[in-house]
């Protein structure tokens, strides 16, 4: 394959970032917006061409005997640390990176278009587009990385872009603190990632994904059976790399930044904190999947963390008031779903059936569909916020009459995420649950329950926004549908959410490149569908019209409701640990030591020097003859000493 | 065994040096003090001659007695009125000076008498064992650049003297 | 009676002691310079004496003395220029009045 197109896919967004970032202030808003949208549209077209070439051309570079290959379009040396440890920069084409190219560019283009309407009256419009381009570049670089070090670099770049965009409204203190929180929490996680990379590359002498994943047994044997604290070094490395993914993908206990990240502009939440950046952790696990397979402890860890997070986030989402927070926790829950799916895609025959491909494929499928319908939901939420000027559902209610487009698209999104046939979420969720049941019935049952909760809280949100009862404020300020720049992406994404489930995803994306024929597991599908419909029914009863049920349920167990509303006090726990224990306890002692012992030592030196110089400055009398006397006495003393020594 | 003439010359020069040195630093009239210094320098030149360094003795007389003394006299005349007397020294200062110089003298004499030096060679022996230093040798020593030849220091001294002339003029000229 | 090296070194020691005494006690700058000449001259004398008595075959002591004489001339010229300048600005050549550069 020619390298022109792949290079352009990365070059156009970064050039657009430089152009808009440097020259943006001299441009009118319209020019900057059109430039950004055109740039992203071109990138999207090119990405589609590349991805479709990869999937459909049948070129032996990409597919051999029906098995899809991993193909490095280019891979150039960038940093040579030692003879064997070399960092390259490159562009990999394989099923998941091609799939991610489509996802990222599509969502990014939709968000670019949508932002034109949404951000129209905000100051710093040009800067906003520059940051969006920077993010698109970083995320594209992340998914096409040929080696883990390149991925780490772009991993940090997306972190920076996320930081810049969360803190876009930098005059709001809450936005500033949210951006700092996001950056610091993910930085802590990235420390684990970096240590994991170093551990892994120390033993394997390579960063390259293909050389690691094509022969995971060699990676295992290269560690030479070294162990640390009861687990093998490779397990540690993979778990630490996963910790990086936990930070980016907001797994417990590093999830605390994502709800606060909703302080950023809503399109940004749709792009970064729902569809693309937060699934980087999932992508990372998928990318290293064959290596994860040889150390099953780390996959178990992935599963357990994912399962706990999915349930936790779903419960919390049931008790949030801010609609963006509900969507944020929903995102956490859904990403955890993908993690569990990957964790259950264990490369060993279970009861004679080789299930390894299923969980992986299903996780990627869900990543794809989730990106579409979660972006749709976020963009819909943005349209609502645009109309009502509040994030709070208590300020909404009964909006279905005023905003029909938003209402229908939002409903499609809710149905998709709830997993109702024939919307996209149904298919991917069914595959994931099938994979989990095949691994162990417990994971399947647990995640089915989470799926039910998902349906419940999404429809709770839906009814509270669009039904319930009309907000009396509408008489003064009548909400209306958003302009076409905002409605068009909603419609497109809703259409995609309707049909995406029928894509034969298994033909394209599997863990080893061999096609997998998707077939609906009827018992699993029926169970999850019944659970989802029951949950939707429950939500309908409770929230369709104003009634006493919600209050009654709340009063049945007020402690649980309050705990869920306060997100089970994770922020408070973090505050307690950082402020009371680290700042208050450890840092106070260190500060005391610094101020009194280290500084004290320096002050003592200064004090002694000053005192001594004051006391001896009288000797500097300006009398040459006095100097001569001292000089002579000194010389005489020296002579005497020398002479005594000579004797 | 040295000749009586040499011994007499030595004693005259040595006593002159001692006496005039003391007078130089004790005289209260500055012009006299400079004159006593001249006598000390001349006595030193006598010792140079006696030790067999005729050229050096000549330089001593010409440069020191002829050149530097003139500078001193000029400076004194420029900065003093005739018959100017410096004030009587206070006891404290005198004691400090005596202690310092006494201490130095004691140390030097101690070193002189206890250091392992070949005391026994007499002047006559040294004069006969040493070779005569001719003007040609001195000239070669100053104009060569080999071992024990001093062209570079010689040139450096020339530059230094030039710098001194310029510096002296610059510092002392009227502004 | 032999005139050994010690005989010649004694006047030199006396000269040095006088120079040190004079340099410390004299108030007048020119008088101090005169004392300095005494010390320098005794050093020259020592060079020559050691040359003659310890290394009669060579002439390095004499050469160094020649250089020292030239240096003394240079030093005296500069010192006197400075003294004249001080005399002009202070109106006196008393060392005790030249102490502006103390702490």
Image (tube, rainbow, N blue to C red):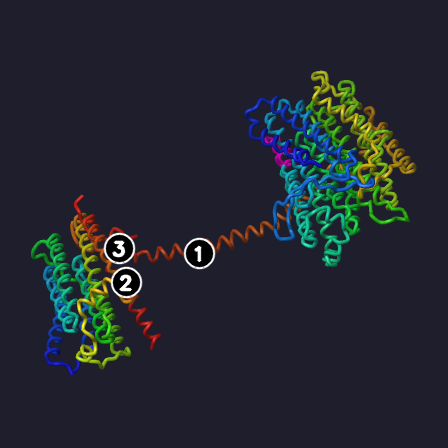
Picture residue at 31% right of the left edge, 72% below the top: A640
Horizontally, is A583 left or right of C56 in the view?
Answer: right
Q: Sort mark 2 into few (<14), some (14-19) or many (20+) by Cα contacts within 10 Å.
A: few
> Residue A233: image x %, image y %?
72, 55
- What kind of secondary structure does the magenta stretch mostly adopt? helix
Mark 1 and mark 3 in contact? Answer it, CB < 8 Å: no
Query: Looking at the image, which residue sits at the far left?
Result: B82
The chain to which mark 1 is attached is A
Residues tagged by mark 1 and mark 3 found on one chain of the structure: yes
Q: CA distance from mark 2 to mark 1?
A: 53 Å
Q: Which residue position is annotated with label 3?
A: A622
The image shows residue B137, relative to residue A24, as above or below, that is below
Classify the position of the N terminus of chain B by image quarter: bottom left
Using the image as rendered, state which of residue A318 and residue A293 is in the foreground. Answer: A293
Q: Secondary structure at mark 3?
A: loop
Picture residue at 15% right of the left edge, 81% below the top: B2
Magenta-colored span: A161-178
**Magenta stretch holds residue C38:** no
Q: Which residue position is annotated with label 1?
A: A605
Can you tell which mark lies on residue B145?
2
């Amino acid at each position: 394959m020619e390298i022109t197109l792949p290079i352009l896919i990365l070059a156009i967004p970064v050039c657009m970032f430089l152009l808009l970032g440097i020259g943006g202030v001299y441009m009118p808003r319209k020019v900057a917006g059109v430039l950004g949208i055109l740039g992203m549209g071109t990138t999207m077209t090119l990405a589609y061409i590349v991805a479709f070439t990869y999937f459909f051309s049948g070129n032996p570079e990409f597919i051999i005997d029906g098995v899809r290959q991993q193909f490095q379009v280019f891979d150039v040396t960038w940093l040579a640390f030692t003879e064997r440890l070399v960092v390259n920069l490159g562009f990999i084409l394989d099923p998941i990176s091609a799939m991610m190219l489509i996802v990222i560019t599509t969502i990014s283009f939709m968000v670019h278009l949508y932002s034109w309407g949404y951000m129209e009256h905000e100051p710093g419009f040009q800067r906003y587009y520059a940051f969006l381009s920077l993010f698109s570049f970083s995320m594209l670089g992340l998914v096409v990385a040929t080696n883990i070090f390149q991925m780490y670099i772009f991993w940090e770049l997306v972190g920076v872009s996320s930081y810049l965009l969360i803190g876009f409204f930098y005059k709001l203190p809450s936005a500033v603190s949210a951006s700092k929180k996001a950056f610091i929490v993910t930085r802590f996680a990235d420390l684990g990632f970096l240590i994991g990379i170093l551990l892994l590359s120390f033993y394997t002498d390579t960063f390259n994904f293909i050389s690691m994943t094509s022969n995971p047994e060699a990676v295992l044997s290269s560690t030479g059976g070294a162990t640390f604290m009861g687990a093998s070094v490779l397990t540690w490395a993979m778990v630490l790399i996963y910790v990086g993914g936990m930070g980016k993908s907001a797994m417990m206990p590093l999830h605390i930044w994502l709800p606060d990240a909703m302080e950023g502009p809503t399109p940004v939440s749709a792009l970064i904190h729902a569809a693309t950046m937060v699934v980087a952790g999932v992508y990372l696990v998928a990318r290293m999947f064959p290596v994860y397979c040889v150390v099953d402890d780390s996959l178990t860890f992935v599963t357990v963390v994912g399962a706990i997070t999915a349930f936790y986030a779903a419960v919390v989402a049931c008790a949030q008031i801010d609609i963006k927070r509900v969507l944020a926790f929903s995102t956490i829950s859904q990403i955890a779903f993908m993690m569990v799916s990957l964790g259950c895609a264990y490369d060993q025959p279970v009861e004679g059936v080789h299930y390894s491909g299923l969980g992986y494929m299903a996780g990627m499928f869900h990543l794809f569909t989730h990106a579409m319908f979660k972006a749709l939901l976020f963009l819909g939420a943005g349209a609502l916020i645009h109309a009502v000027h509040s994030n709070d559902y208590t300020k909404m209610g009964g909006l279905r009459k005023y905003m029909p487009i938003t209402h229908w698209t939002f409903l499609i999104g809710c149905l998709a995420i709830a997993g109702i046939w024939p919307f996209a979420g149904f298919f991917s969720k069914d595959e994931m649950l099938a994979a989990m049941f095949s691994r162990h019935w417990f994971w399947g049952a647990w995640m089915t329950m989470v799926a039910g909760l998902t349906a419940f809280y999404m429809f709770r949100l839906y009814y509270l926004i669009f039904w319930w009862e009309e907000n009396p404020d509408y008489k003064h300020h009548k909400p209306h549908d958003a302009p076409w720049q905002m409605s068009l992406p909603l419609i497109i994404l809703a259409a995609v959410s309707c049909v995406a489930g029928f894509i034969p995803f298994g033909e394209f994306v599997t863990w080893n490149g061999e096609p997998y024929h998707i077939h609906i597991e009827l018992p699993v599908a029926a169970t999850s569908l019944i659970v989802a419909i029951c949950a939707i029914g429950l939500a309908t009863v409770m929230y369709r019209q104003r009634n006493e049920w919600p209050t009654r349920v709340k009063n049945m167990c007020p402690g649980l409701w309050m705990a869920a509303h306060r997100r089970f006090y994770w922020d408070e726990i973090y505050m307690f640990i950082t402020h009371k224990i680290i700042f208050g306890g450890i840092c106070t002692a260190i500060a005391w030591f610094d101020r009194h012992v280290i500084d004290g030592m320096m002050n003592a030196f200064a004090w002694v020097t000053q005192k001594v110089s004051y006391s001896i400055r009288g000797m500097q009398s300006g009398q040459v003859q006095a100097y001569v006397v001292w000089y002579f006495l000194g010389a005489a003393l020296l002579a005497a000493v020398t002479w005594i020594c000579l004797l | 065994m040295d000749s009586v003439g040499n011994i007499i010359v030595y004693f005259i020069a040595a006593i002159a040096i001692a006496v005039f040195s003391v007078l130089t630093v004790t005289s209260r009239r500055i012009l006299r003090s400079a004159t006593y210094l001249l006598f000390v320098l001349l006595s030193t030149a006598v010792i140079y001659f006696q030790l067999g360094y005729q050229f050096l003795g000549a330089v001593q007389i010409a440069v020191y007695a002829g050149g530097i003394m003139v500078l001193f006299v000029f400076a004194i005349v420029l900065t003093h009125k005739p018959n100017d007397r410096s004030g009587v020294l206070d006891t404290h200062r005198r004691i400090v000076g005596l202690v310092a110089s006494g201490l130095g003298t004691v140390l030097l004499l101690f070193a002189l008498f206890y250091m392992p030096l070949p005391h026994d060679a007499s002047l006559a022996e040294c004069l006969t064992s040493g070779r005569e230093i001719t003007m040609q040798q001195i000239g070669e020593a100053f104009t060569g650049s080999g071992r024990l030849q001093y062209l570079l220091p010689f040139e450096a001294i020339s530059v230094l003297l030039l710098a001194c002339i310029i510096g002296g003029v610059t510092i002392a000229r009227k502004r | 009676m032999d005139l050994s090296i010690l005989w010649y070194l004694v006047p030199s020691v006396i000269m040095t002691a006088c120079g040190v005494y004079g340099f410390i006690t004299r108030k007048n700058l020119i008088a101090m310079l005169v004392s300095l000449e005494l010390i320098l001259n005794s050093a020259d004398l020592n060079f020559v004496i050691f040359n003659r008595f310890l290394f009669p075959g060579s002439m390095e002591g004499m050469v160094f003395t020649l250089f020292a004489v030239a240096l003394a001339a240079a030093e005296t010229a500069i010192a006197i220029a400075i003294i004249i300048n001080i005399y002009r600005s202070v109106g006196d050549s008393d060392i005790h009045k030249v102490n502006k550069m103390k702490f």
